[in-house]
Amino acid sequence: MIPTDANKLTSLLLDQSSEMLLAVDAATLAIVAANQRVSDMLGYAHSDLIGRPITELECALADVFYWEEVRAGGGEVEDVEGLYACADGSTLPVMKTVRRVVCEDCDVLLLRVRDERSLKRAETNLAELAAQLRATLESIWEGILVTDAEGRIVNMNRRFSAMWEIPGDILVQDSDAVMAWLSSQLADPESAVLGANPAAEDGSDQFDLVELRNGRVFEQRSRLQTMRDQVIGRVYSFHDITERIVSEREATLARERAEVANRAKSEFLAMMSHEIRTPMNGVIGVTQLLLDTELDAEQREFAETIRSSGDALLTIINDILDFSKIEAHKLTLEKIDFNLMTLMESFADLYALRAAEKQLDYAWSLSPETPALLRGDPGRLRQILTNLVGNAIKFTARGEIGVAIEVRSTTDHDAELYFAVSDTGIGIPADRLEAIFLPFEQADRSMTRKYGGTGLGLAISAQLAEMMGGEIGVESREGYGSTFWFTARLERQPAAARNALLPGEEQMPRLAGNRILVVDDNDHNRRLLHDILSRWSFQVVSAADAETAMHVIEAAARVGRPFQLALVDARLPGMDGEALGRWLRDHPKLAETRLVLMTRVGQRADARRLAENGFAGHLSKPVKRALLIDCLLRVFKKETGAARAESRSAGSVRNRTARILLAEDNKINQVVAIAMLKKLGLANVDIAQDGQEALAMAANVPYDLILMDCLMPNMDGYQATHELRRRGVNLPILAITANAMAEDVDRCLAAGMNDYLAKPINYELLTAAMDKWLPPAEGGASG
């Protein structure tokens, strides 16, 4: 329905204007009409504007003088700047036009007012841009010359005039005079000073050499200038390359010397790595075996000291080797598929125990949107975490260590992840925050004596994070703890990739929908359990203390939605976990909620006492998915004999009758390797002292696997492997060597070896290698 009232239509039209429109009584200077735009721009209600003197709004000094002129009979102006006072106390720069309308019964001033902020900003930005461009032009080391479409000079920087040594009296003349003088300086009078035709070409850079009569040579680079697809000129840059030939010769010679030095350094490092790792293999390996024997308390303490000292020495060796490889640009990243959650669980196995040894809590969490199936270098990712978490444990005497992982950005192909390692330790002085990522630096130099370490770990971590497309940083307050963080960009596995099920995980859908309460005062643990359980379609609620948990349990029971299970931390503030269990046990109406107690890793739990307090199970923190699955199946009584059979590791059924050939010339390494193999149940081991003996023995005995040392007398492991492959021997050959450079791995694979074990031989890695490469026992699981 269109209104027929002309005044109403007029008001509607005026309110659509983008300008402020006001009518002012010329006699009283009071506002008698205003459109909606005035209220919108100045913030006054329409009723507050009508009757208000215009002089209360216009507040520039020029405005004051203007309205005095109006009182004297003047009035009309065109596009005059002014300031308007807003309701919030701010001022609005405007441009106003005033017309005076005089008729029989009125004398009115009509004001059209435009908001000038955008124009002011544009003018300011344009002025700033011009200044920046000029400053940029003058700061460039190269000589810059700008011509228009006809080839006339329109601009140049001081560097250009200095390079060409243009006299001052020439500079003040027109473009033709300057161009004539430039041409007179050329070694070849027939050549043109500007080699490119500004009206031609496709817009790509053009390069020319300009030789002057005084022997100087400039490299000239030019590019077209266009605007709206029209050529408007060309920009030339001139670089003095007169001394380039001498410099290039010197640089080439220096580069050759550096390459020779780097090769010598790499060879020295490889040799030292081999020479140090060989005896270290004996020290660490024999100590591992010794700790598995019957020892009294004092003997075990001595053996543990040897092992920890050996591990510390090996860490130093690895740090120095890694840092040297980074310096020589020889460190490369792998690109393999891995599961981030599995990596963090295995990482927690070691560091939660180390934290528990110092009575520290260790927890980690992964945001629900973070992709778990990734592709990259999990070993180097773990190395960064090892450095950061290891430092956190080292410098923290009480409290907790937390690792949080979030996703910063993600696409279908990759994801940028954010890792934060926080502690409640000694913190870092503010003046040392930047230096700690430099090689051989620590927050306090006295820490080397107190805490040990090379000061290389953070420098290596920073380099690795950069190689992964990320960065590293720290936030700290001395005496209150630190948070080290780093980012890494990792590829995502294809959408078709499927996460391998853990033993028993296929039964989780049967339990979906059960309500589970997580009671833990640690944010990381709550988030981790909430995420894991939610992925299995449980209904999860969290509480940070026992009192809150009691209210939540009672409220759920009252509305007929009781919890089927509560996962309760043993160490809660106020009432502890076991007390909460006793409270629940003493309330028969709440008995439907089963209880599982969560304790710090390494903390023993008395099964009988737990049962008396109402607990149906026990878990160590940080909780691993495999153990959580097993606990849920037992508590909900869903585990079957078939599921238990499926939960056995495929690699646990190893062929104990397999024949192994160990090619190793070092007696101590022979003893360590044979002892570790026997511990795995592999007692059928023969020894070859060098590559030639290994060839002869492999020709006469049907071995299942060969462990081949790389550096041996007479014939090394590379040559022996190559010859075995040439003869058609296809059994698995695993390198065991103290050489730990990336090129050594490539050399092993190129020789025909299947895998690589670095010395000192790690028992867990040896176990995994045997599970991977040895054929299973007759009728056993394949692995």
Image: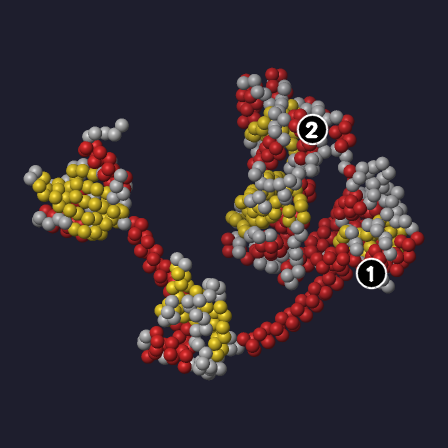
Front one among 595 and 539: 539
Front one among 187 and 88: 187
The residue that label 1 is drawn on is 719
* Left or right: 20, with 531 as reference point: left
- Residues under labels 1 and 2: Cα distance? 51 Å
Percent from the top left, x then y, of residue 463? 60, 56
Q: Residue at x 69, y 67 (%)?
A: 263
Identify whether 608 is placed above or below 304.
above
Secondary structure beneath dot 2 equals helix
- Residue 39 appears in the figure: no
Q: Residue at x 41, y 76 (%)?
A: 162
What kind of residue is marked 2? Gln
Quadrant of the rendering where the C terminus is positioned: top right
The residue that label 2 is drawn on is 507
* Left or right: 771, with 526 as reference point: right
Percent from the top left, x then y, of residue 4? 21, 29
Identify whether 426 is placed above or below 207.
above
Percent from the top left, x then y, of residue 457? 63, 54
Q: Earlier in the sequence, mark 1 or mark 2?
A: 2
What kind of residue is marked 1? Gln
Residue that extends furthest to the front in the rendered view of this protein: 200
Secondary structure beneath dot 1 equals helix
Q: Quadrant of residue 276?
A: bottom right
Front one among 291 and 487: 487
Identify whether 49 is placed above or below 136.
above
